[in-house]
Image (tube, helix red, strand yellow):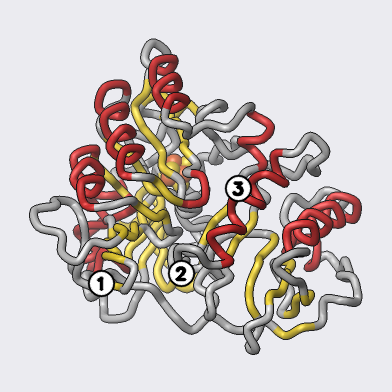
Amino acid sequence: MTVPQIKGYCPGALRPMQSGDGIVVRIRPFNGRLRRAQADGIATLAAAHGNGMIDLSSRGNLQIRGVTEATYPALIEGLRRMGLLDPDEAIESRRNIIVTPFWQTGGETEALAPALTEAISAADAPAIPGKFGFAIDTGRQPVLQTASADIRLERDAGGGLILVADGSDKGKAVSIETIIDEAMALARWFMETRTDQNRMAALLRDGAALPADHFIPRQKQTHVPAPGYTPLGAMVGLAFGQLPVKTLASLAKQGGLRMTPWRMLLVESARELPGVDGIITDPNDPLLRVIACTGAPRCAQGQAKTRPLARTLALHLKDGAFLHVSGCAKGCAHPKPTHLTVTATPDGLNLIRDGRADDAPDRAGMTPEEIIKAL
Ligand code: SF4
């Protein structure tokens, strides 16, 4: 079996990553939002300096694909002019922040993202590992609990703000005045307490005890976002998180864009979306229940063309079932268990039930036709 290559860091714009289809430049939109001009500008830059394809990642970042060494400098300069870059690589690496897209203008949540960004950018901010991140999930009900994050800003059942270490079902009571300082203090606690762990949940799993003031029960997430119209605008899905530049340019004409970790974008204020190709507006579309990584040939480690395979398999997926199609055992599009996982290998397709891409398969070496019959 081919051992997937682990890169060990999250790419950014200032620290891009080489992939099978060129350099991947990841943009981390400040406060989880792009103004219309920024979204349109990214589409223009990606068309000029990439291969026309953009991915929306599971942390709500945008990845411009197919950049070359020759086009990278002009792309970076364009992003800098639009205010989309951090001051340096170290700050960019630390600024892993997911923000609930359901914030209200003038509300507390809107103010928290820039305040946290400023704290993380400070010279004395803790040097957290590259994949360590924060979730600002301070709407009345949590919506980001399944998104990857290590320190979570949430509300308890009574509406009070709490700070949560990922992996714990309790949080610490905080106020709007203290929550950012407390988040940084928790990050420092993580750095001082860890041995070789890079993630908060792993540290707690290994037996670290949180400070005694983490005793407020968390709310459990019950709301599962889906495409449709909301009071804030239109939530639209993107199959596999793929966002062709034409789709991005069309959406930018409709309104500002809020990022989500669910392969969906919230188009601010949009009441209808006429003529936008490449989006999913039907909440029952089975493609919303299918995750597929980049795969071959765009990812050098891919053992199969994952996305065409995933589109075919989606047509045969049973109601309510979720499918993950992975180009190799690394499973980077979805590192968690799924009802059904199909992992490509040099010897055919592996089918894994209720497991991850690198788990032992229920059946190995299958063809696509055999997978369809087994779904
Ligand atoms: S899981 Fe997919 S995207 Fe990740 S390394 Fe393997 S083939 Fe590439």
Viewer-proximal residue, 159 or 76? 159
Quarter of image, ligand 1:
top left
* Residue 243 picture location, percent across and down: 28, 45
Q: Which residue is mark 3?
A: 96
Whether 280 is drawn above or below 68: the answer is below
Mark closest to the chain's N terminus, 3 or 2: 3
Q: Quadrant of residue 258?
A: bottom left
Q: Which residue is mark 1?
A: 229
Q: Quadrant of residue 49?
A: top left
Q: Dot 2, how many residues are within 10 Å of its Cα: few (below 14), some (14-19), or many (20+)?
A: many
Measure how far apart labels 3 and 2 are at the Cα level: 25 Å
Helix, strand or loop at disc 3? loop
Which residue appears at 63% of the width and 77% of the height?
155
Q: Are marks 3 and 2 in contact (CB under 8 Å)?
A: no
Horizontal side, residue 106 vs residue 343: left or right = right
* Residue 276 picture location, percent across and down: 14, 52
Which residue appears at 22% of the width and 75% of the height?
284
Q: Which residue is mark 2?
A: 338
Measure how far apart labels 2 and 1 are at the Cα level: 28 Å
The extreme front residue here reads 106
